[in-house]
Every structure is written in structure tokens, then in C-alpha cells.
Amino acid sequence: MSTKKREVPVKLLSGLFVNYKKSHFRYLMSDPFPQNSGLVLHWLLRVLLVWCCAFVLSSNAAAAVESVGALSANPDWFVDLLEDADGTLTREDMEHPAVAGRFQRWVGTGSTINFGFTTSAYWLRLSLKYPVGGAGDWLLEIPSSQIQQIEFHAPGLPVIRTGDALPLSSRPYFHRFFAFPLRLTTEPQVFYLRVASSYSLSVPLKLLSVNSFLIDVQSISFVQALYYGGLLALLLYNLLLYLSLRDARFLYYSLFVLTFGLGMLAGNGYGRMFLWPDWPAFEAVAQSFWLSVAAALGVLFTCVFLSTATVVPRIHRVLRLVALLYAAIAAYLLASLAWTLPKQPAFQMLMLVALPTCGLIIAAGVNALLRQRREALFFLLAWGMLWLGASLATLHAFGWIQSNGVTAYILQISSAAEMLLLALALADQVREARQAAVDVLRSSEIKLERMIEERTQQLTLALNQEKILLGQYMRFGALISHEFRNALGVINSQLSLLGKEDKKGIPQTAKRISIMAGACKRLTAMFDNWLRHNQIRQSLQQADLKPLALNPWLIQLLAGQNHVTEDHSVEFDGKVVAAQVLADASLLELAVINLLDNACKYSQPGKSVRIECREQPDWLGVAVIDQGIGIEPEHMMNIFKEYFRVAPEGSIRGMGLGLAMVQHVAFLHGGRLDVESVIGKGSTFCLWLRKAERGNDEQAR
């Protein structure tokens, strides 16, 4: 039966890992922040289950291994207790009837006697015998590393004085806890233990045969190796992530795991055995010191992980104060090594502050969870587990709950769960941040592609405009070349005639000069027209619109245009006498002169050009009607383009800017330019402007 009991935990532990699919581990190793968090949680819960089972099994290790030894039953034993408030009683005093009568039988359940925080020393009187025939070698183990003073008095043997305040060599066995040899007989024997401590005094007692003791040590060492191995793996993994990513969250988490693990090492006695064996003074404060530092780092990790400075600034300020309080406790404990300072208040303060600290952290986590932060769920589970463990450990330390294997290891069990869940929360948060960064990158790529596409379209449009402009300037160059050739030809021919006539004495100088002056005037007018058009096109200001009496203004304008209409007769029809328009007089003059000039250029000499006023509701129009060659239908859409001419190399002078200029003037006036044309019969251009009514007049003002 005993063999089966040992096989159960072995099968349980091995089955949890062997049955796990190898593909899951390959998946976990493929990405440090897997997107399938459910798979990671499943794996972590399995590891947590292993840890919990291991701790529970180790808490009952004595019962499991007792039947494995040479005996089939435990020896009979009982314990009496005596409180030594001032710590002055000696072993000889125990024989005095007055002192012996003060002992009281311990009737608690389990195997742990818990006195809580006390300044008193306690004497334990143990009555032991060996019930089965024959004597045997046994061990009395006190599985606790936090008892500062222990005296063991066995009948007929020298007293053994040890404790964590004394050198490691004072212990009978090189063991993380305290074990004392016993030689039991079938007759009852009385053994005395004196214990004292400045922090929570808990005295667990285990009576084991030598063989059972060795098995117990091995089984518990295996469980502790699982725990510390898991912590070491979490520490190294997250430390490497910090070195790679330079993310403060991983640094705080790694330091938190390190210091908490050192605190557990101190509490389990391994720190004294392997890290500071010759420093008993530090052993007295080691666990509380490391846990204080771990608590401060845990609070700082919470602040960084949940961004409490911006999300919950009030809780953030309180958490920072709590971190300073933990740091002060750690500093006080170190100072107590150099100066004689009472340690028990620091131990009690550490225990009392732990519960509200977890409450604050959980409040910050709930706030993050309400803000739809997924990683807050794992964070809350982690600190909830630690809060539960810290609460039970505090109650156990003050002696308010029964002491057993589970309550003795509850902080270690809860810390294992917390470390795993925090690792998952941290990985999930980084995965979410990475996914958000990927989304931002994708959005940026889409935006960049859109910008590139828009920029490409703009460049294409600009290139097309440049091509159009280049074509316009090429046409302009051709026009300039044509106009210059004509004008220079006229000037050259007149100079030649002037020379010949001068030799023959023919007085034609005035006539020749007048013809050359006309050619120069044509070139000057052409350049002025081009410059005036560019000024209008590039202007960003609105036209200065004012009420203008159209008929009188047109009569005055036409009277000064004899040089334009000298080869044509101009008829004016001003039927709309009293009407006014909203117009900029200078721009309107430029438009009408260009329309009149075009009418004369494209009409045969002697043909009449008609100017008339037209009226529509809210509109007045200036129509210029010629009897010229007309406009081909296929050219009708292009005549308003700059530098466009139906026959660029023809005999009709011009640059193709006049109609474009007139249309721009119409646009500045909020009007329009209409055109009608019949081939061989002439064209009509009508510039429509708004009437200067009261509303428009007020708007103009």
C-alpha cells in the first residue's frame, strides 16, 4: 500500500507533462508573445497545477513516508506548553513543582504550534515513547527557518543550542531546518524545547524515523526545485526580453521575481545554507527584507504595467507612497543590523501593509479592466491569487488561523500562481501593443500608398500642365516669330523705299515713318496684351465691382477706339438706357476692347461691327456682332484656351489670348461669356454681367 501511495504523485506529475502535445511546445517556442493566449493559459495552468499538487503533497510528506520506514505506526507523544514572559526560566526550573504545574496540554490539531507575534519565550515539554517492542533512532524536526533561539534538552545528553541567530554549525545536521536526534524506548521520556523569536513564532513538529526523514527531505527538495526552477526560467526569459526590447516592464518584473524568489529562499532556509551561511544577523531579517524590496518592485511594476500615472493618477500617487513605505521598511531592517533596533514592528508593518497594497493594486486593475484592457484580466487574477495567499499568510503569522502544511506554504503557492499569471499578462500586453503597432504600420502603409498615388496624380497633372504650357509657349514663340517677321518686313521694306525715294527726290518720308510706326505699335500692343493677360490670370484678388451705367460708359469707350475700327464702321444700339451693372470699369474695358478688336480682325475691311446692349432677368449683356469668317464647330471648344489660334501662320495678327482674357474677366465678375457663330456670316460674343440692383449694390459695398 505504501508503494502505491508513492506512485500516485509520480504518475500525476509525469502525466501532466507527458500527455501534453509536443506541437504545443513547438508553438510556444516559435513566438515569445503567442497570439493564441488561450493555449498559453492552458499550458500555464498545467504548470500551476503541478506546483500546487507538489506543495500539497509535500505538506503531507511525513504521513506518506512514515509507513515506508521500519515501523508500522507512529510513537505515542504529546506536548505541554509553558509561556516564559520575561525569558528567565532555565532547564533546572522545569523540575520545580510550581513551574512544572504551569504547563498546559496542547490540544490543537495538526502538527504546528503557532504563537503568532510575541516577545515571550516558550517551553515545550514532549513526552515520547516507542510503542512497539524494541528501541529506535528517531529525529525531531522543526520545519521552520525563522526561529531565532532553540534549546533542545534530551535526558542524559548535553543541551543543544541553535537557531537562525546562531551559526549554521550549531545545528546537529546540515539541514535547512532544525532536526534533533532522539533515542526512544518503550518507556516514556521527557524532552524539553525552548523557543523564542522576534517575529511570528510558529513551531511545526515532525517526528520521523531516520529513513523517513531522508525520504521526506528528498521529496520536498524535489518540489522546491520545481518552484525555484520555474522562477529562474521566468526571470531569465523576461530579463532577456528586457535586454532585447529595453522595456521597463520586463525589468521591473524580472527584479520582482528575483527578490521574491530570494525572500522565499530565506523563508525556506536555503538562503542561510547556500547564500549567507556565515551571516546569522542577516538571516534574522532576510525574508522580510527581500519581501519588502519585492513588494516595492511589484508596486512599481503595477504603475508601469497599468499606466496608472495617466489613467488613475490618484491611485498612482498612493501606490508611489506605498512603494516608498516598503523601501523604508527594507532600509530599516538593514539598519537594524548595524544598530540595536527592534525588528518586530517592521515585521508586523510588512504584514499589515500587504493587504491594503493588494487592494489598491486590484482597484487599479479593475479600472483597467473597465477600460477594455484585456491583459488586466490576467493581472487581476495574478494579484488576486497573491492577495489571497498574503491574507492567509498574515492570518497565519498572527496565529488567527490553524497551521498546517497548506497554510505554512500558502504564500509560496500563491506566489507561484501570481508569477505565471503576471508573465501571461505581460506577454499579452506586449502582444496587444505589437498588434496595435502592426495596425498602425498597415494604416501608415495604406496612407503612404494613398499619398503616393495622389502625389503621382498631382505630378502627372503637373507634367501634363507643363506639357500644355510648353506647347503654349511653343505656339507663342511661333506667333512672336510670325509677328516679328511681318513687322520687320514692313519696316525693312519701308526703309528700302525711303532710301530709293530719297535718291530720286520724292518726299514720302512722313508716309514711310507713319507705316513703320504702325508696325511698331502693333508689336507694342501685342506685348501689352500678353502682359495684361498674365496679370489678370495670376491675380488672387477679387474685382472691384461697382454700379456702372452701361450705355454712357460704352459710348465714351467707343469714342476713343478709332485706331482699332478705322477700317470698319461701328454701330451701337443702347436700348437699355437706365440699367446699371456691377462691374470693374478697367477690366470691363479690357474685355470689350478685345471683343471689338477680334471682330475687326476677322471681318473684311468695310464690314460693319455692331455693339448692342441686351437684357435678361437680373442680367445685362454687351454683345459684339461681326460679319466675319465665323468659327468652325470643331474649334468652338478651344477658342477660349490660351494661345489657341485657328490658323497660327495666317495673315491675321494676334496671340490667341484675347478670348481667354475676356472669359477670365467674366469669371471675376461672376458672369459668363456666350458665343454664336455661323461660317461665312459672322460671330456674336455676348458678355453677361449682373444688374446693379439694391441687394447687389449692398453686396458690392
Image: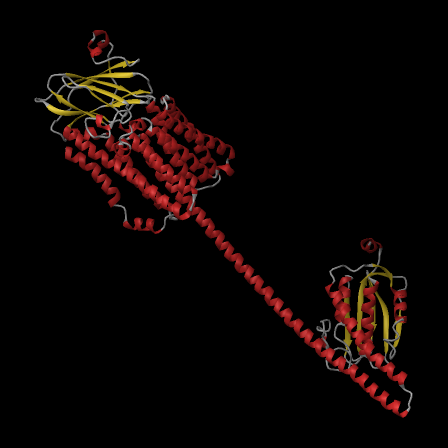
Position in image of residue 148 (x %, y %): 28, 23
**Residue that sits furthest to the top in the current view:** 98
Point out the image quarter for the N terminus.
top left
Position in image of residue 204 (x %, y %): 25, 24
- Report the colour scheme: secondary structure
| Quarter location, residue 489 | bottom right
Q: On the picture, is 387 further left or further right than 16? A: right
**Is 510 rendered above or below residue 64?**
below
Residue 368 visible in this rendered orientation of the protein: yes
Q: Residue at x 36, y 48 (%)?
A: 32
Position in image of residue 619 (x %, y %): 81, 62
Point out the image quarter for the C terminus.
bottom right
**Is 398 rendered above or below residue 553?**
above
**Residue that sits furthest to the bottom in the current view:** 504
Q: How many numbered dots are placed on residues in this image?
A: 0
**Is 90 rendered above or below residue 652?**
above
Residue 646 visible in this rendered orientation of the protein: no
Q: Residue at x 23, y 7 (%)?
A: 98
